[in-house]
Structures are given as structure tokens and as C-alpha cells.
């Protein structure tokens, strides 16, 4: 599953602990509820600015899963003054679109009833649509075309890049939604205006078109990868009660059903000032930055209803769970154990345990790859989320070895950790690597901002200054205790992924795919299979255009895979649009 591939830093074994530097964070609170974190750094004339909305997929509910990630997209659509040629007509069109959508939702309800009765097999298929739905859809498409004529595409990004900004992006996890950018030091006011405006006066234009984009992203990242769908089901099986059991991208039935009204309600609840932390790191004076942030963000009214906490907690696991699948991938196993949330006293020993096991110098690689030679690749990782956590070990079987042999070898490496204290020298090396890696992460302006966003999103920004010392204080007995407490049979879920019959046959394999690496072949087969099912030339052209703009990016191996996929897209287009 490789969610948490961690790299052990190469460093010298020192006699004593190495402590990371302390980041001088100034914390302020605006009258309307915004929290503001400021870190002055004058090494370069740049400012990294960002903010975290304390909302992720765990704050959703069945029926609107994926809405937090959808908002990550919508927050770049602009304001009344950014992104449109005619703000008044733009808003009128949005209202007219929503009136049509209300009628279309009535028809969608009828279509779901037909699905339950077995009258149709797939609600999204053309034959499932009612006559009335098709009429409304045509009217809606006309409004979409009119709206597109008013749009100024990507104006939000263009304003920033014209001013010398870079690294603009955002992300969504189970626990947070983060936004960030880096601007020249003399553009702090631009940042304050742009970011406050998209919070104060957001315009969710192209809402339904962007919803379709998010659905397509889900299809490409989950359903068009060799094991994406299996990992999604395995994760849902692992969590019994917690909302971590649905994917950040949302369930496929929920995303197309999210309405703008639901989105407006979600935004009002979770994007209010009391639920957002603003952050600035870089070349500024704190007093001046605080005044400027207050002037722009202080305009936004305080929320009237506190966002609800995540109440449903995970229940204890009483029995081992096992998941067996056949996929177009090399045989591999994935083992997950329930652990603890971020900031829990045991989380630091579990992080140390991760590094004892992980990497080329870790116990798993030495034991499974070099020693028993049952695996070609193995990784370990601890994921401490805001409300709960898990420890994961993934391993790929070597040719001729069974997954049972690989699994037994994993447990054989874990067993001594629960019986014998880790040698002091081995533990100190891990601690030194931690400190060296943390020092490197906190020596750049943007690196500090990124760490602040994640620490604050998980519940406490102080972790960037306190976690290092807590890791250094982990003892051999702590490691032994957590290994005993969490690495037990009842607490784990085991996934076995066997190669699907016929997926590895080499005799009649496409020569282009045969030239790829073993890791790339399954992904290529899955993507090409999806392309062969695609019937819409417009979507293929859009995909081809995006791939062509990215043709020179990435390492040579990825470029080769992309080149093959582009060729297959072109072939599929030729089939759908033959030359006359």
C-alpha cells in the first residue's frame, strides 16, 4: 500500500542525542476567531503563506463523502472581482443553474427508485435517464456554455504568478484542508487580499463541472490503478466505526449527488473564522504582518454556529481481519494494526519503531530481503491521525515465494521487539537520523510552513517544537512496551494481493508494456483498459492536452510510461474519430 514510505537519513552515530532547533512561533488571535501563527525568517526575501481549515473527510457524513476535497477545488474559482467578465450575470446564471438542478434531483430520485427495483443496472448510464431529466440536462448545458463565455480561466493563479509567487497548491486529508503559496516579501498585502477575499466573497462558479472533475480524479486515482479499489475496500474493512473508513475522495455514488446548497451549508459551517488557522513564515516584521492580516481578514464575520467535533470513535478490535484479492500487480501483503492518535504518548515510540524497521538499514529489509530472501521490497510506517492511528507494513513477494512465507517473515522480525530491549546503539542511530531529518525540514521557509500546517491540522502546532525532544526521550523499554501492546493478532488486518490470472502472461503482451518496469506494467494495463472503454472523444482530447503539457516533467522512467499512455490515447481517439 506504500502510504507511508519513509526514508532513513544517512548520518553519523553520535554519542548523545541531537535536538532539533526551536522555531520561534508567535501566536495571535483575531477578534473574529482566526488564529494567526507568525514566524520571522530574514534569510531570503520571500514569505510562505498558508492556512488550514480544520475540516477533512472525517467531518463528512454518508451522502456527502468527498465534499471536503471538492471544496479544495472550489476555493480556486475566484471571487466577484476575480475569475469573471460579468459578476452580475455570473451570479444570475449560478442561481438559474441551481433552479434547474433542483428539478433534475427530483428526476434522479426516480432513477434511484428504478435502480432499487432492478429496472436499470447503473444510475449513471444514458438509458437510466428519464425523458424529463434529458430535457433539463439540455437546458443546463446551455447555461454552462453561457457561463464559460464569462469566465476568466485560472485568473486566481495568474494574478499570483504575475506577481512572482510560486508553489501555490492545496491538499485534503481525513483531518484537514491546507492551502499554501510562496510570495516575494513585498507582496504580503497581495496575499492578505487574495486569501481573505476567497474566504469572504467566494464564488462557487462551475460548481457542477468541477464536481465532475473531482469524480474523474477519483476514477483516475482509484479505479484506474491496479490496486486502488482494493486498498479502498481494505481501508473500509479496517475501520469499524470511525469515519476514517470512507475515502478522502468520497464514495462514487456520493460525489455526483452533492448539491450546491449542501456545499454552501458545509462552507458556512467549516470555513468560518473560528475553524481556520492562518500562517506566515518569512521576511516580515510580526507587528506589521499582524496589523495587515487583521485589516483584511478582520472583515470576515465571526461564525454563529461552532463546527461539530468528530464524536464517533473507533471500537476495539476483537478478531483478526483478512482480505484476499486478485489484482494486476506483483504479489504483495499489507498488514495494519490499530494504534494511537497524533500527540498520544505512545506515538513517539511508534515513530521510533517505524525507523527501526524501515529503510535499507532497517530490520525488515535486512530480514526479508537480504536474510530470508522472501521479499523484493518492504516498508513500514506509522500514521498518527487526529483521532486515531495505524501502523502499516507492506511487502512484495519474491518470485517463487508465497505470501504466507512473506507474512510469517514479517512476524518473525517483530517478535524480538516485544521480548528484548532494542540495543542502545541501534536506538541512538535512529534518534540521530530523526534529529537530522527534522533539522533539514525546518531550515527552509516553505518547509517550516508545511510542517506548521500539518501539525496544526492534526491538533497542535506546538508539535514542531516538542516532538523532537519526546522522540529523543524514547527508551528501549518504551519500544518493547508498544510492540507488545499493539502488534497482536486481534488488533490487525491483513491484506493479500495475488497476481490476477492472465495478467502476467508475457507471450502475447503488448511490446510497449513489456518494455516497462515490473512496477509500471500493472498501472499501464489498468489505464489502457480504461481508455479502451472510453467512448467520449472530448474527454480523451482533454486528457491528451493535459499529458502533452506535462510531457517534459518527472523522471525519465515516468516519462516513458506517460509516452506510452499518450500513444494509446491517440490510438483510441483514432478509433472513435476515424479519418474521412
Image: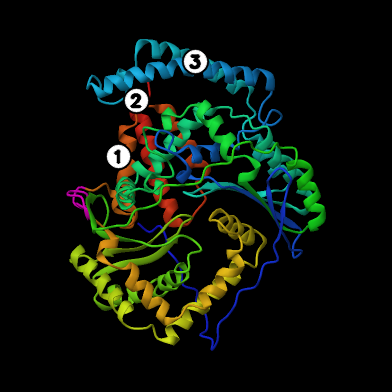
* Depth order, front residue of 13/550: 13
| Quadrant including the N terminus | bottom left
Point 75% across, 37% down: residue: 299
Residue interval drawn in magenta: 498-508
**Residue 413 or 536: which is nearer the viewer?**
413
Q: In the visual, does 168 lie left or right of 550?
A: right
Sequence order check, earlier mark of 2 and 1 = 2
Query: Which circle's residue, 3 or 1, is located before the other in the chain?
Result: 3
Residue linked to disc 2: 124
| Mark 3, other Cα within 10 Å: few <14 / some 14–19 / many ≥20 | some
Counting residues from the start of the chain, the first of labels 3 and 2 encountered is 3
Q: Is residue 181 above or below residue 270?
A: below
Return the x and y of residue 368 as percentages of the image width and height: 28, 73
Q: CA distance from mark 3 to mark 2?
A: 18 Å
Which residue in the structure is indicated by mark 3? 100
Q: Nearer the viewer, mark 2 or mark 1?
A: 2
Question: Marks 3 and 1: which is nearer the front?
Answer: 3
Q: Is residue 135 magenta?
A: no
Relative to 7, say whether 160 is above or below. above
- Please say if the residues under marks 3 and 2 sit with CB atoms less than 8 Å apart: no
386 sits left or right of 300 in the view: left
**What residue do we see at 68% from left, 22% from top?**
87
- CA gap, disc 2 and disc 1: 20 Å
Q: Position of residue 388 (x, y in %)?
A: 43, 57
Please tell me whether mark 1 sits on a helix, a strand or a loop. Answer: helix
Identity of the residue drawn at 18% across and 48% down: 502
Which residue is labeled 1 in the image? 529
Q: Position of residue 216 (x, y in %)?
A: 42, 36
Q: Position of residue 343 (x, y in %)?
A: 51, 63
Regarding mark 3 in the picture, which secondary structure is present there? helix
| Residue 401 position (above or below residue 164) | below
Amino acid at each position: 500500500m506504500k502510504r507511508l514510505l519513509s526514508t532513513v537519513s544517512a548520518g553519523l552515530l553520535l554519542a548523545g542525542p541531537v535536538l532539533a532547533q526551536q522555531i520561534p512561533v508567535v501566536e495571535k488571535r483575531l477578534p473574529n476567531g482566526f488564529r494567526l501563527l507568525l514566524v520571522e525568517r530574514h534569510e531570503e526575501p520571500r514569505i510562505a503563506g498558508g492556512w488550514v481549515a480544520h475540516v477533512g473527510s472525517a467531518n463528512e457524513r454518508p451522502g456527502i463523502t468527498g465534499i471536503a476535497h471538492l471544496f479544495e477545488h472550489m476555493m480556486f474559482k475566484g471571487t466577484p472581482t476575480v475569475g469573471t467578465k460579468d459578476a452580475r450575470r455570473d451570479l444570475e446564471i449560478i442561481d438559474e443553474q441551481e433552479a434547474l438542478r433542483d428539478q433534475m434531483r427530483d428526476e434522479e430520485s426516480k432513477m434511484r427508485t428504478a435502480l432499487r427495483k432492478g429496472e436499470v443496472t447503473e444510475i449513471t448510464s444514458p438509458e437510466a435517464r428519464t425523458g424529463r431529466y434529458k430535457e433539463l440536462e439540455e437546458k443546463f448545458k446551455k447555461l454552462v456554455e453561457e457561463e464559460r463565455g464569462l469566465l476568466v480561466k485560472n485568473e486566481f493563479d495568474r494574478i499570483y504568478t504575475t506577481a512572482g509567487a510560486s508553489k501555490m497548491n492545496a491538499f485534503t486529508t481525513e483531518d484537514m484542508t491546507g492551502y499554501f503559496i510562496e510570495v516575494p516579501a513585498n507582496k504580503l498585502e497581495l496575499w492578505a487580499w487574495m486569501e481573505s477575499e476567497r474566504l469572504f466573497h467566494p464564488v462557487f462558479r462551475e460548481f457542477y463541472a468541477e464536481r465532475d472533475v473531482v469524480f474523474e480524479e477519483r476514477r483516475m486515482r482509484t479505479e484506474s490503478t491496479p490496486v486502488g479499489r482494493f486498498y479502498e475496500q481494505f481501508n473500509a474493512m479496517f475501520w469499524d466505526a470511525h469515519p476514517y473508513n470512507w475515502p478522502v475522495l468520497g464514495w462514487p455514488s456520493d460525489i455526483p449527488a452533492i448539491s450546491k446548497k449542501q456545499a454552501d451549508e458545509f462552507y458556512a459551517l467549516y470555513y468560518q473564522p473560528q475553524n481556520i488557522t492562518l500562517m506566515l513564515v518569512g521576511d516580515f516584521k510580526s507587528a506589521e504582518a499582524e496589523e495587515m492580516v487583521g485589516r483584511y481578514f478582520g472583515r470576515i464575520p465571526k461564525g454563529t454556529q461552532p463546527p461539530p467535533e468528530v464524536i464517533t470513535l473507533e471500537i476495539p478490535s476483537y478478531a483478526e481481519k483478512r482480505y484476499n484479492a486478485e489484482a494486476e500487480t506483483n504479489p504483495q501483503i499489507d498488514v495494519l494494526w490499530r494504534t494511537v492518535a497524533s500527540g498520544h504518548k505512545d506515538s513517539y515510540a511508534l515513530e521510533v519503531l517505524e525507523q527501526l524497521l524501515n529503510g535499507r538499514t532497517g530490520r525488515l529489509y535486512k530480514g526479508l530481503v537480504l536474510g530470508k530472501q522472501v521479499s523484493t521490497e518492504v516498508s513500514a510506517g506509522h500514521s498518527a491521525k487526529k483521532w486515531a492511528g495505524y501502523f502499516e507494513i507492506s511487502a512484495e513477494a519474491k518470485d517463487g515465494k508465497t505470501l504466507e512465507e512473506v507474512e510469517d517473515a514479517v512476524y518473525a522480525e517483530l517478535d524480538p521487539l516485544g521480548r528484548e530491549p532494542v540495543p542502545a546503539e541501534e536506538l541512538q542511530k535512529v534518534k540521530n537520523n530523526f534529529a537530522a531529518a527534522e533539522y533539514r525540514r525546518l531550515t527552509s521557509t516553505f518547509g517550516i510552513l508545511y510542517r506548521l500546517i500539518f501539525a496544526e491540522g492534526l491538533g497542535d502546532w506546538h508539535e514542531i517544537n516538542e516532538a523532537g525532544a519526546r522522540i529523543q526521550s524514547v527508551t528501549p523499554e518504551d519500544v518493547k512496551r508498544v510492540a507488545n501492546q499493539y502488534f497482536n493478532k486481534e488488533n490487525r488486518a491483513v491484506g493479500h494481493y495475488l497476481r490476477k490470472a492472465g495478467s502476467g502472461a508475457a507471450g502475447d503482451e503488448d511490446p510497449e508494456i513489456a518494455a516497462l518496469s515490473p512496477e509500471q506494467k500493472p498501472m499501464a494495463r489498468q489505464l489502457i483498459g480504461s481508455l479502451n472503454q472510453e467512448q467520449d472523444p472530448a474527454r480523451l482530447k482533454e486528457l491528451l492536452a493535459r499529458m502533452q503539457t506535462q510531457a517534459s516533467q518527472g523522471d525519465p522512467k515516468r516519462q516513458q510510461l506517460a509516452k506510452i499512455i499518450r500513444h494509446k490515447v491517440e490510438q483510441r481517439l483514432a478509433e472513435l474519430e476515424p479519418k474521412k
